[in-house]
């Protein structure tokens, strides 16, 4: 059974700092990994999708990397802003399946 | 493209009552998912549809939960009778093969 772990569970940083969120998964037979953002009381917003053949994806100040062999992904946020405050979730489906397995998320607070 | 639509946004019911949630996926997305997200946890898959057929409902508490996707488009999720532990956000998502998920805004259910 796939298990997804996210560290740290919570993170508080001053505005302007660069930061890294970590995601690890136990079964490397995945065909993609997706990072989501969730604001309190809201649904999930997709940030980045990395296919298993890729090593990283970038969107604006966000960069996500994927190392299938070690079962790890990182989300790098450059020059953090108060508007980045949210919970960040990573999720993986297994090869041949569409079911997404989610981590419990990292709650990020960016202090002005 | 239009996003995944869900209604209602909020619902408060007493235990043992019934409730239904509605989801309209992105046009052309064959796969539809219902997830349950309890406060402080990552979303957990309840049921997955491919067109109007059920692919995975292994995590659906079938004694009280039911779901259908008539004509392979809209879907409804019903709880009858509700329990206190059903209080959660119910998220609907849709996807195309090999692509990432798109989530709706969710329905926040409170059972009192």
Image (cartoon, coloured by chain):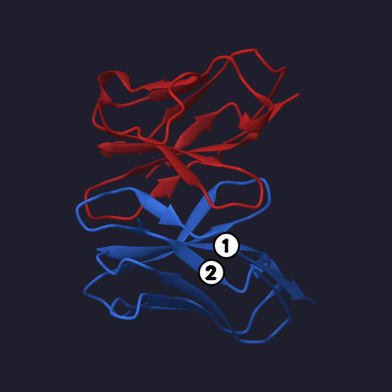
Chain colours: A blue, B red
Q: Earlier in the sequence, mark 2 or mark 1?
A: 2
Badges 2 and 1, same chain: yes
- Judge whether A17 appears above or below A96 on screen: below
Q: What element does badge 1 sit on? A: loop
Residue at point 59%, 13% (across, down) = B18
Image coordinates of residue B72 in percent, x first then y, are 26, 25
Image coordinates of residue A17 in percent, x first then y, are 67, 87
Cβ atoms at labels 2 and 1 below 8 Å apart: yes
**Residue at mark 1: chain:** A
Image coordinates of residue B45 in percent, x first then y, are 43, 42
Residue at point 51%, 76% (across, down) = A22
**In the image, is A83 to the left or to the right of A28?**
right
**Residue at mark 2: chain:** A
Residue at point 64%, 55% (across, down) = A39
**What numbered label is drawn on residue A88?**
none
Q: Quadrant of residue A95?
A: bottom left
- Judge whether A62 appears above or below A87 on screen: below
Question: The N terminus of chain A is located in which quarter?
Answer: bottom left
Residue farthest right in this picture: A112
- Residue density around tag 2, few if under 14, some if 14–19, many if 20 or more, within 10 Å: many
Residue closer to the observer: B26 or B65: B65
Residue wearing tag 2: A6
Residue farthest bottom in this picture: A17
Q: What element does badge 2 sit on? A: strand
Residue wearing tag 1: A105
- Judge whether B73 appears above or below B26 on screen: above
Image coordinates of residue B9 in percent, x first then y, are 62, 31
Alpha carbons under labels 2 and 1: distance apart: 6 Å
Q: Quadrant of residue B58?
A: top left
Residue at point 28%, 57% (across, down) = A94
Instruction: Mark yes or no: residue A58 visible.
Output: no
Question: The C terminus of chain A is located in which quarter?
Answer: bottom right
């Amino acid at each position: 059974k796939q298990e997804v772990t996210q560290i740290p569970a919570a993170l508080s940083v001053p505005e302007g700092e660069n930061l890294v969120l970590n995601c690890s998964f136990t079964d490397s037979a995945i065909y993609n990994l997706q990072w989501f953002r969730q604001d309190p009381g809201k649904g999930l917003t997709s940030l980045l999708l990395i296919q298993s053949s890729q090593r990283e994806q970038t969107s604006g100040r966000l960069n996500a990397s994927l190392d299938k062999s070690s079962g790890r992904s990182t989300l790098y946020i450059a020059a953090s802003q108060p508007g980045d405050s949210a919970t960040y979730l990573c999720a993986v489906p297994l090869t041949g399946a569409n079911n997404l397995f989610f981590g419990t998320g990292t709650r990020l607070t960016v202090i002005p | 493209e239009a996003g995944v639509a869900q209604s209602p946004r909020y619902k408060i019911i007493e235990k043992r009552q019934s409730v239904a949630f509605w989801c309209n996926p992105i046009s052309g997305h064959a796969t539809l998912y219902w997830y349950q997200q309890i406060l402080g946890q990552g979303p957990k898959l309840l049921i997955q549809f491919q067109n109007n057929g059920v692919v995975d409902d292994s995590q659906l508490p079938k004694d009280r939960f039911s779901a259908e996707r008539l004509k392979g488009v809209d879907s409804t999720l019903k709880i009858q009778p509700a329990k206190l532990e059903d209080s959660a956000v119910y998220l609907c998502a849709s996807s195309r093969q090999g692509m990432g998920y798109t989530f709706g805004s969710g329905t926040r259910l409170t059972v009192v």
